[in-house]
Every structure is written in structure tokens, then in C-alpha cells.
Image (cartoon, rainbow, N blue to C red):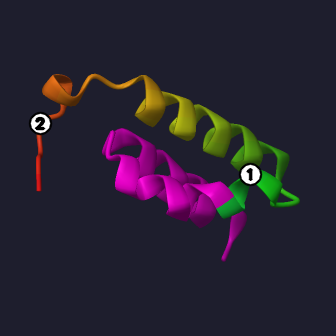
Amino acid sequence: MEPELLRHAIWILGATHDPKALPAIEPSSTTPDQVAREKARLAAAEITASNPEDTIHKS
């Protein structure tokens, strides 16, 4: 996957605040792209820090 596309995908997954997205984000924490690794760390932190009542979309 292109680095820019990977970065956007990670950001979108983090924005869901859905813990089910964590397995999709996790592999990016070891990618050679330093920016993608940082986005993966931030996305995972956002999900784990999220209050379930604050999520807009609940599936």
C-alpha cells in the first residue's frame, strides 16, 4: 500500500473510535514508514481512550 494511502486508512480507522479497528491498525505499528507508525500509535491511543458514549456511529 502506498504510504500516503496507509496513513489515511489508519487515521480513518482511529476516527471510528471502534475497538474492533485495533487489529487492522496494529500491523502498521511496525511499518518502515515512520509517519504511519506514529499515526498508528495515535489512532490506537484514540480508540483506547474513547468513551463509548461519545461515538456517533454504533454498529
Q: Secondary structure at mark 2?
A: loop
Q: Which residue is mark 1?
A: 29
In the image, residue 27 lies in the stretch drawn in magenta: no
Q: Label 2 to label 1, Cα distance in Å? A: 26 Å
Locate the N terminus by quadrant: bottom right
Query: Magenta stretch: dominant SS?
Result: helix
Q: Which residue reaches farthest bottom?
A: 1
Q: Is residue 49 above or below residue 1?
A: above
Residue drawn where x is 38% and y is 47% of the image: 19
Q: Is residue 7 above or below residue 52?
A: below
Three-letter residue code for mark 2: Ile
**Which x, y percent locates residue 47?**
42, 35
**Side (left or right) of 34 relative to 21:** right
Numbered circle sitting on residue 56: 2
**Side (left or right) of 41 relative to 47:** right
Along the viewing direction, whichever of 22 and 1 lies nearer the viewer:
22
Which of marks 1 and 2 precedes in the sequence? 1
**Side (left or right) of 56 relative to 11:** left
Residue drawn where x is 11% and y is 47% of the image: 58
Three-letter residue code for mark 1: Ser
Magenta extent: 1-26
**Which x, y percent locates residue 3?**
71, 63
Q: Which residue reaches farthest right?
A: 32
Residue drawn where x is 44% and y is 43% of the image: 14
Q: Secondary structure at mark 1?
A: helix
In the image, residue 10 lies in the stretch drawn in magenta: yes
Locate the C terminus by quadrant: bottom left
Along the viewing direction, whichever of 26 and 37 lies nearer the viewer:
26
**Which x, y percent locates residue 11?**
48, 46
Number of residues whose C-alpha sits closer than 10 Å to that of mark 1, classed few (under 14), some (14–19) or many (20 or more): some
**Which x, y percent locates residue 5?**
57, 65
